[in-house]
Image (tube, grey):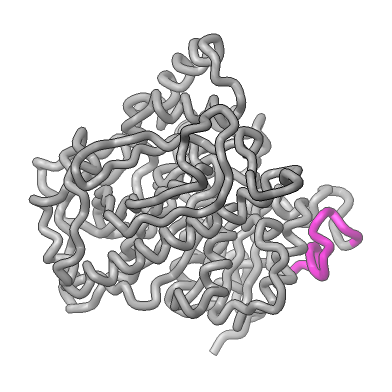
Amino acid sequence: MDTEQDVPHDALIIESRKRGTWDALVSRTLPKYSGPHPVGVCDVELPIPQQTFGTFAHKNLPNAPIGITIDTVLFSLFYPCQVDRKYGHVLWFPHLAQTINGFLRMASRDSWAYRMAAYPVAAALVRGTMLPAFGDVPVKIPEDGSRWPLIIFSHGAGSSRLLYSALAGELASHGYIVAAVEHRDGTGPSSKITTPDGRSRKLDFLNWRDIYWPDHEVQPPDDTTLRHIQLQVRLAELRAVHSGLVSLSTGAADFAPIAAARPALKAPAPSFDWTRWAHCLDAVRPVMCGHSLGGSAALLAAASSSDFDFSRIVVMDPAVQRLEPWGDRGIPCPLLVLASEEFFHDPDFARTLSLARSATSATVLSIAGTTHPSFSDVFLILPNWINRLAGLRTPPEYVCDVAVACIREFARGDEVMVRRRGRASDAGRDGQGQGGKEAEPDRGFGLGAPGTVGLHL
């Protein structure tokens, strides 16, 4: 058997997809998925028992409910599908104006002047952009009698489930079912909640400065207290998603999505044939994956072994500080960390290295020339020259392809192959992730040329 040193590193470089400077803007379609399977996508909103988290009140809304209350959970399923001409592609952002307003509120720029400036720019860049996936198509049943393994994905703060469609769709095209969760914890720009009776309400971004805690003698000086509550909300949502998908995989009758979850795009329930999923979905011990605060949620869920039983954990730039104090909790499964170059400089990189050692096994990789948003869809729609101005020196398709290759190999248990993709580096070891003594001074990062994959643990 080959050892890590036996394989030339150049042979492990990903052959990334190529795109033109203006491809996404002209075609109004995100890059096509590269796997052998066409990809379907459908939204699912499930009713769950009502739960309330936190004791805070709203400064400007004295009659608003206390804390964060959830009674449904929303997620998008990306999956290998059967294609028919009657099915069309799916809008990337079906509620663009609502999303723009949410981002402006997050940035404390919610005024008519900013809206007048933001709408034309966003419309020029995003409006009408489609996913290279088919909406509400039948799931493909493997011919060999096997089942598609499940990956659950948790998005970062300031994001949404659809902002990681490239990762989710790529994985689906290679034979996975990905459940991308829309967290209703107030960390997203805006989200629409639909109740079983068809009524809907909006949930906007929750700014910690707009709330107060009546039961606290001293008000929290930052958003840490709120983030801890929001992580508890995420854990409850992840439990509900996993429980619902287990029911779907076994053909249980209690899997009953809300029919009005996506009326504009002909929501699959009740006409959608969910019975096919009982023959092809493997929801037992899924892979849990997350970016930024979603990475924090993945780690916290993994450590809550009495509630979750994940086979493996994949985190990208996890916000580990949000988990402190971590204590003596362990991660009872293998862990893969994918870090951007920007995250490599952050104190959370050193915290991540320390926490990773509590897993049964851990692999920590970095991708040179990348920024924190590189794992999302953000840079896939922009011209490369704008991406470079934003600090991204590695093509976004390459970042996605490296991440997908590592996740696929890791999910099937081939940790040796994942580690082979990275060049062993002392940079970032033992808490030296912020350009420490081992970093290469000529490049300023210690991670190598753009696109270089580094191995740190």
Residue 196 in the figure: left or right of residue 228: left
Residue 10 in the figure: left or right of residue 164: right
Answer whether residue 429 is magenta in the image.
yes
Q: Residue furthest bottom?
A: 1
Vertical position of residue 208 compared to residue 426: above or below? above
Q: Nearer the viewer, residue 87 or 299?
A: 299
Residue drawn 77% across the image and 51% down it: 345
Where residue 398 sits: x, y (%)?
Answer: 53, 50
Q: Nearer the viewer, residue 348 or 121?
A: 348
Location of the C terminus by quadrant is bottom right
Q: Residue furthest right?
A: 437
Can you tell which quarter of the image residue 284 is in?
bottom left
Residue drawn 12% across the image and 65% down it: 275
Where residue 233 sits: x, y (%)?
Answer: 49, 56
Q: Nearer the viewer, residue 215 or 386?
A: 215
Residue drawn 91% across the image and 60% down it: 437
Is residue 29 shown to the viewer in this render?
A: no
Where residue 245 sits: x, y (%)?
Answer: 28, 66
Which SS does the magenta portion mostly show?
A: loop
Location of the N terminus by quadrant is bottom right
Vertical position of residue 223 compared to residue 363: above or below? above
Is residue 162 shown to the viewer in this render?
A: yes
Residue drawn 40% across the image and 53% down it: 181
**Residue bounds of the magenta highlight:** 423-437
Residue 129 in the figure: left or right of residue 139: right
Answer whether residue 267 is magenta in the image.
no
Vertical position of residue 208 compared to residue 27: above or below? below
Residue 233 in the figure: left or right of residue 222: left
Q: Nearer the viewer, residue 258 or 417?
A: 258
Where residue 65 sits: x, y (%)?
Answer: 46, 41
